[in-house]
Amino acid sequence: MSYKKKQLGVGLVEVLVALIILAIGVLGYTALQLRAVDATSEALTKSQATLILRGLTESMRANALGQSSYPTAVASYVGFNKNTTAKKNCFSAACTPAEMANYDAFSAASAGFNEGIHLMMAKCPEVSTIINRQCLFAAWGETELKANDYSQCMDSNGVYATASQCLMMEAY
């Protein structure tokens, strides 16, 4: 009988220990799920940025006569917001190559803004003065782009900044 008295409540303690171990496992799984959701969101944003940049580079390729107008056109929409309007709508009217470059830049900036992505165009990092290659930059989250300043995205050697949320694509 004394043996039974010593064992009273031991089963309850075992159940409580098992529940604590289970709770720790569930918390770990929850943290893993949250990280997976963040990674999925980041991948989606990166894919959207890639599509926007690719669309703009294809527009630049199609508008060979207006290629020199794109850096200025993209720069004019660096601070894009919901009140920004296109200088001329080339979708419904004939445009010069420079006007088309401006409209393409507006369209890309508008598409990016709708997804929380900001665009910028500048001379590519690590490029000599002989070659005039331009790069498009897309940034989202805490990473900011300013006119001709991609330092929050990458350094002048073309190395991405730690924890930056951006993408660079060579345009021409």
Image (cartoon, grey):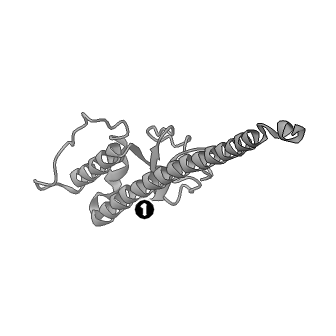
Using the image as rendered, state which of residue 50 and residue 10 is in the foreground.
10
Please tell me how crowded label 1 is: few (under 14), some (14-19), or many (20+) other residues with Cα within 10 Å.
Answer: some
Residue at image point 65% right, 43% down: 23
From the viewer's perspective, tell me whether residue 122 is left or right of residue 161: left
Residue occupying the far left of the picture: 93
Q: Is residue 133 visible?
A: no
Q: Residue at the front extreme? A: 1
Give the side of residue 156 with respect to residue 87, left or right.
right
- Residue drawn 30% across the image and 49% down it: 111
Query: Quadrant of the image for the C terminus?
Result: bottom left
Q: Position of residue 20 (x, y in %)?
A: 69, 41
In screen coordinates, is 154 left or right of 16? left
- Front one among 77 and 114: 114
Q: Secondary structure at mark 1?
A: loop
Q: Which residue is mark 1?
A: 172
- The quarter holding residue 128 reads bottom right
Amino acid type for the residue under numbered disc 1: Tyr
Q: Quadrant of residue 72?
A: top left
Give the x, y percent position of residue 43. Answer: 48, 55
Of 12 and 76, nearer the camera is 12
Residue placed furthest toward the top: 83
Residue 41 visible, this angle: yes
Q: Quadrant of the N terminus?
A: top right
Q: Residue furthest right?
A: 2
Q: Residue at x 49, y 50 (%)?
A: 42
- Residue 164 coordinates in the image, percent (x, y): 56, 44
- Residue at image position (30%, 61%) is 59
Residue situated in front as seen by the camera: 115 or 17 = 17
**Is residue 61 positioned above or below 83 on the image?**
below
